[in-house]
Image (cartoon, rainbow, N blue to C red):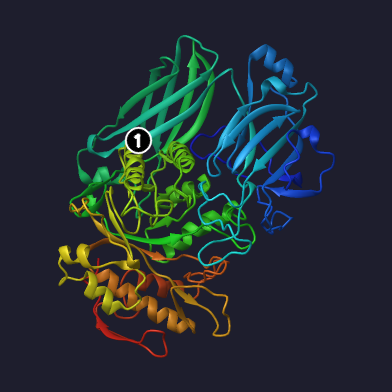
Amino acid sequence: MAYPRPQLQRSNWLCLNGPWKFSFDDAGDYRQPSDIATWTHIIEVPFAPESIQSGIYDTGFHPNCWYEREFELPSIDGQDVPTAVASTGKRVLLHFGAVDYCARVWVNGQFVAEHEGGHTPFSADITAVLNPDGKQRVTVWAEDDPFDLAKPRGKQDWQLHPHSIWYPRTSGIWQTVWVEQVPATYIDSIRWTPHFERWEIGFEAFVTGQQQENVQIKVKLTAGKQLLVNDTYEVLNGEIHRRIALSDPGIDDYRNELLWSPEKPTLIQAEVQLWQNNQLLDQVQSYTAMRTVSIHRDRFMLNGQPYYLRLVLDQGYWPESLMTPPSGEALQRDVELVKQMGFNGVRKHQKVEDPRFLYWADVLGLLVWEEMPSAYRFTPKAVERMMKEWAEVIKRDASHPCIVVWVPFNESWGVPDLTATPAHRNYVQALYHLTKALDSTRPVVGNDGWESTATDILAIHDYDNNPVQLINRYGPEVKLSDLFDRQRPGGRVLTLDGYPHQGQPIMLTEFGGIAYGKPDDHSIWGYVRSAEVSELQTRYTALLTAVNQIELFSGFCYTQLTDTFQEANGLLYADRTPKFPLEAIRAATMGWSTSQPTVLTTVHLEGASNSIHTQLHCGNQCH
């Protein structure tokens, strides 16, 4: 298995995925490991107990679950762990990628960590509680109230069975667990921030452990065989903050060789070492990229140039493993499929994705809008939880070049009274400004869909599946004043009173939702339904041809990538099989005709829910 944290990798680690002992505790009788008399199940970590792949597949309401496994810690430099710790001061860290929702952790019966937040990582230094013989035992209590709507839960349903657009719950451990050995003083975290305008890369590093003087960090940056940087910086008060200036070639042709984009995802490999008095203390492997994103008037900019976004909504679920990918290869395959379908990005919807997905997006070149999973109630506790976990999300992922937009809210979920309640508006504005404070280098969409109060991109959700009506609503004849005063997709105003559109880019960030299923299958949900695959292809082609022509838009996001449980409006089935050929999907996504990209296309859907008969041009005028 690949190291689970792609941008801060060490070689000396041990994966703890695999079989663990497991028990539900519905009554909440257990408070510590010694309370558990027997273990009732074996679970395959990191798959949630609600999933088939976990080996348990229990989708009922279970507010508490317990895990335990034993593992043998390898020796350190040929010595048993206690001896090595005493002689070298080395440490052993236990890491969790994500546990939903509250986690408490014991090692060898000793309490070592507690964390709240179902989508972000946490760690514990377990050195002091290790057994001398090398055999260790880790126990985890995961508490996840299935009815609590005031916690960030995303698409996890609060009803027993998935309904409408909500899916099965994910409880407990759902990302990788691992241990690693680190020196007495080690690199705890790093952050990369490219500055395209100045041809610099911002670098921050935080060092922890024993406080030692005369400690330096060496940074070596390479692009292919080209050495870009080999610098040394003094560590002061456990951290450094530097802007690393690269040699600017001046000529665009040479500059472009180093820029990262979906068309040419050039990564800069980084080796970061910690030294003291000519002795190597710690080293990690990382990477970054030279790229910048910004807003200029009504356009989204990538590397200083207008860039049209063709995104697809990605829920990030699998039928047998839920939010956890069935394998690392599955994440790579998703990125490859999105690109083959003609999209240059995804809007990860209501999910903070596994870092390995972001790694493949970085490597293969895919833009990502990262969105915070919603809570569905507005309470002081919900506000506190959201702000804390969202800050952790940004900290975890800010160095990934693929991430180009942050989205703290979706469709006023958790803030249902934005039009009437000042506190709800203040909450959205607060998270918008908090996001900008934590990362000033990326645009922020305050509330994706409608009822905007603070945003860098005006994002519209409109599931009208009639291409003619979309062109009439957003085409060249429409006045912006009419758009914001009169049009109400989803029955919602696009901007709230007192917060007019100020020239930001306008994007159609949810549309389509065309479901395909057999006529007698009434379990399928979608915004509009096609009875045959050919009808789905015709509808998609007509819709994308129209949207690609609307010059008002700086981009779009189609709903959605895959079928997800009862929501069968994917371009792919849940197993990632295309519903119609990938080359036809790509042609439609790009606004091309599969045979003659520049000729008049006639669209006529017979027997559809809404009959459409129109003529749409594509070709040179398409974005």
- Give the x, y percent position of residue 182: 60, 24
Closer to us: 603 or 285: 603
Q: Which amino acid type is marked by label 1?
A: Thr
Closer to us: 584 or 257: 584
Give residue 230's quadrant in the image. Answer: top left
Q: Is residue 309 above or below residue 287?
A: below
Q: Residue furthest bottom?
A: 606
Q: Is residue 66 left or right of 349 when viewed as pictured?
A: right
Reading the image, the residue beneath label 1 is 193
- Give the x, y percent position of residue 257: 30, 45
Q: Residue furthest front?
A: 420
- Give the x, y percent position of residue 219: 41, 26
Closer to us: 39 or 15: 39
Q: Is residue 281 left or right of 300 when viewed as pictured?
A: right
Question: Element under label 1?
Answer: strand
Quadrant for the N terminus, please. Answer: top right
Q: Is residue 270 above or below residue 587?
A: above
Q: Is residue 272 left or right of 80 when viewed as pictured?
A: left
Q: Is residue 262 above or below residue 439?
A: below
Can you see residue 325?
A: yes
- Give the x, y percent position of residue 247: 27, 32
Label 1: few (<14), some (14–19) or many (≥20) C-alpha neighbours in 10 Å: many
